[in-house]
Image: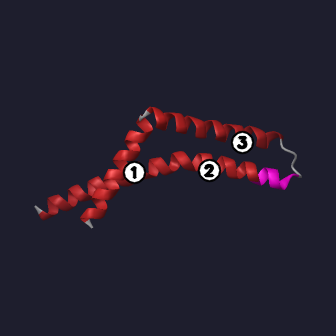
């Protein structure tokens, strides 16, 4: 249990460092650009072209998921730290 909490906290810390890094910022910016591009293309695509619409929706969802996954890892890490701290207090 404690090892799992430590692992989650470490991953959360790495994710936080990643989004603060130049690489992380560049990739998050790229994902945001891809999301906006897909949304703009969805506004003008022929409504009868279902395959094109589906591809654009998938492109937008993947771009949106990227940032959400990182935030989720950070949140899990923060929660693991809180839980580990509470466990340590109750054992102490």
Helix, strand or loop at label 1? It is helix
Q: In which quarter of the image is residue 42?
A: top right
Regarding mark 2 in the picture, which secondary structure is present there? helix
Q: Residue at x 89, y 52 (%)?
A: 48
Number of labels in the image equals 3
Which color scheme is applied?
Answer: secondary structure
Mark 1 or mark 3: whose residue is earlier in sequence: 3
Q: Where is residue 31 in the image (x, y as percent from the top left)?
A: 59, 40
The percent position of residue 11, horizontal first and vertical second, equals 36, 52
Q: How far apart are marks 1 and 3 (CA)?
A: 28 Å
Give the distance between the C-alpha atoms of the residues marked 1 and 2, in whole angstroms: 20 Å
Q: Mark 3 points at which residue?
A: 38
Residue beneath the point at 39% across and 42% down = 16
Quadrant where the C terminus sits is bottom left
Circle nearer the viewer, 1 or 3 = 3
Tell me which label, 1 or 2, sits earlier in the chain.
Answer: 2
The residue carrying mark 1 is 75
User: From the viewer's perspective, is residue 33 above or below residue 46?
Assistant: above
Q: For the residues marked 2 and 3, what is the alpha-carbon distance in whole angstroms? A: 11 Å
Counting from the top left corner in percent of width and height, residue 18 is at: 42, 41
Q: Which of marks 2 and 3 is nearer the N terminus?
A: 3
From the viewer's perspective, is 47 left or right of 65? right
Q: Is residue 20 left or right of residue 32?
A: left
Q: How crowded is mark 3: few (under 14 residues within 10 Å), some or many (20 or more)?
A: many
Kindly state the secondary structure of the residue where label 3 is placed: helix
Residue found at the far top of this picture = 22
- What secondary structure prevails in the magenta region? helix
Q: Which residue is drawn at 46% across and 32% down?
A: 22
Query: Do the numbered discs 2 and 3 sit on residues whose CB atoms are within 8 Å?
Result: no
Q: What stretch is highlighted in magenta?
A: 49-54
At a point 69% along the width and 52% down the height, the residue shown is 58
Q: Is residue 51 left or right of residue 12?
A: right
């Amino acid at each position: 249990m404690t090892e799992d909490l430590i692992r989650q906290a470490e991953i959360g810390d790495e994710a936080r460092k990643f989004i603060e890094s130049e690489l992380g910022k560049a990739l998050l910016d790229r994902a945001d650009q891809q999301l906006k591009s897909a949304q703009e293309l969805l506004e003008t695509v022929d409504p009868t072209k279902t395959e094109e619409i589906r591809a654009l929706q998938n492109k937008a969802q993947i771009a949106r998921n990227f940032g959400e996954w990182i935030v989720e890892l950070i949140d899990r890490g923060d929660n693991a730290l809180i839980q580990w701290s509470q466990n340590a207090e109750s054992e102490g």
